[in-house]
Image (cartoon, rainbow, N blue to C red):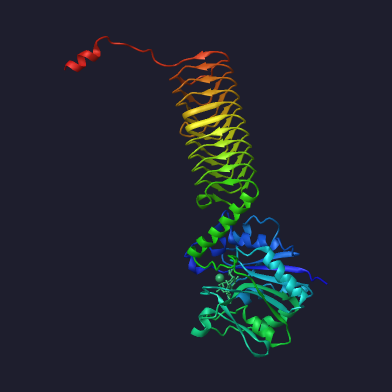
Amino acid sequence: MKRKLLALVLAAGKGTRFKSDKIKVLHPMLGKSMVHLVVDCMFALRPETVYVVVGHQKEEVMQEEYSKPVEFIYQKKQMGTAHAVLAAKKIFRSHKEKDLLVINGDLTLIRPETLKSMIKQHQKDGNTMTFLSAEMDDPTGFGRVTYHKNGLIRIFEEKDSTPSQRRIKEVNVGVYLFKIESLLKALPEISNKNIKGEFYLTDIIEVMSKGDGRVGVCKVPVEQEIVGINDRYQLAKAVEILRQRKIMALAASGVTIYDPSTTWIDLDVKIGRDTVIYSSVVLEGKTKIGQGCQLYPFVHVRDSRIGHQAKILTSTMIEESTIERGAQVGPFTHLRPKSIVKAGAKIGNFVEMKNTVFGRGSKAGHLSYLGDCDIKDNVNIGAGTIACNYDGEKKHKTIIDEGAFIGSGTELVAPVKIGKDSYVGAGSTITKNVSPGALAVSRSKQVEKPGWGKKKRKK
Ligand code: UD1
Ligand code: CA
């Protein structure tokens, strides 16, 4: 019969080698913290509950937005991986008949499939415990697996091992599956008599294989699933693997990515089929891009929605904004948070927009600042239009009604409203509302001094 499963993620440690104010497992990999990634992997195994052992910066670990509720266990002092499991002892006492999967909080590249086959083997063989091992070309930093007479298996941590043990290439990955009843019996037998003076969870392998327990070793092919992330260079290498996986998955779903080596797409980003992505594009956070879009080089999008068939031209930045179907943005446009570009609208060269609704079919082709504006449909914004939205203390709104035409070089001093189908003459400074259908011009009369230029040049 299949035993019920609980999962425990160890995330209380500091990760000293990161040399960071932030603990290791909170560092992000393509938009998700390491602990978040590991928790996600646990949920994919459908356990009854996922527990996370927290210690250093526990509030931050607890505040992560996990996809489902997680239970937290507090390990006050970090005295080793076995000590971390002991912190949850009380809880597991009432789950003796179940299995517990324990995983280090930094194993972010392991696929659920690998763990599923481990669970299967564990249950089929009726093991007391099963752990994952892997052959590494470079086993530095990992615990080494050693086999002895009478089925005894021991793990030697790098710091505690002899030079000949260090040559062993089979390593302990950091994933263990236990019958909870046996785990609870064995845990108190672990001592801290080692170089670090810590209670090593790995010592439980010796305890269990020495007794009448049955210890299984599940060897996994390395295939980029087992990477120790102990410093920031290893983090960069692990991110690279995740990045490639994400790009491969998108390509498989019908997205064209011209240059995978320069494209950065966060794990939560969604992209519709037939969208084409040129080189050096960065898509972050909870960005969602529709079908048939085109994203030209150096486009950077964060937490935004882009509708079907939209075109985002070169060197454009879009933050927390929405671009509707068929709209065109860029090149060199900056859409700051809360910009909404409606269907079929066009925003062009060197336009900055913030907290602005830009209506259907409206156009702002060149060199403008549109902040706190409500721009209705089919409006034309001339080159160099500036919404003067800030009086030094407060922000004010500019409303431009349907079909209005704003001439080039206009300053709209907010709060102000430009009426439907009205015209504003080029170079105007508009401080009063403009009535529907009117023409407003506010610029000083041109004066001419005949012969002035000639005289000046003679001097
Ligand atoms: C551990 C294993 C080692 C294995 C390696 C794989 C032990 C003793 N050694 O070593 O055999 O090859 O992982 O990466 O387990 N943690 C706590 N509380 C503690 C100590 C650690 O929650 O008191 C957490 C850490 O946050 C981390 C995980 O446990 O997520 C592993 O701890 P770490 O110090 O990274 O273990 P390693 O020395 O890498
Ligand atoms: Ca580690």
Residue 408 drawn above or below residue 257:
above
Residue 457 image point, x, y percent:
20, 17
Image quarter where the N terminus lies is bottom right
Number of marks in picture: 0
Q: Residue at x 56, y 85 (%)?
A: 193
Q: Nearer the viewer, residue 157 or 71?
A: 157
Residue 347 drawn above or below residue 123:
above
Residue 6 drawn above or below residue 386:
below
Quarter of the image where ligand 1 sits: bottom right
Residue 314 image point, x, y percent:
49, 39
Q: Nearer the viewer, residue 39 or 222?
A: 222
Which residue is outermost to the right?
1
Residue 427 image point, x, y percent:
43, 20
Image quarter where the C terminus lies is top left
Q: Residue at x 67, y 71 (%)?
A: 102
Q: Is residue 360 visible?
A: yes
In the figure, residue 13 lies in which quadrant?
A: bottom right
Residue 456 drawn above or below residue 306:
above
Q: Residue at x 73, y 84 (%)?
A: 213
Q: Nearer the viewer, residue 54 or 256?
A: 256
Side of 358 relative to 94 (left or right): left
Side of 156 relative to 214 (left or right): left
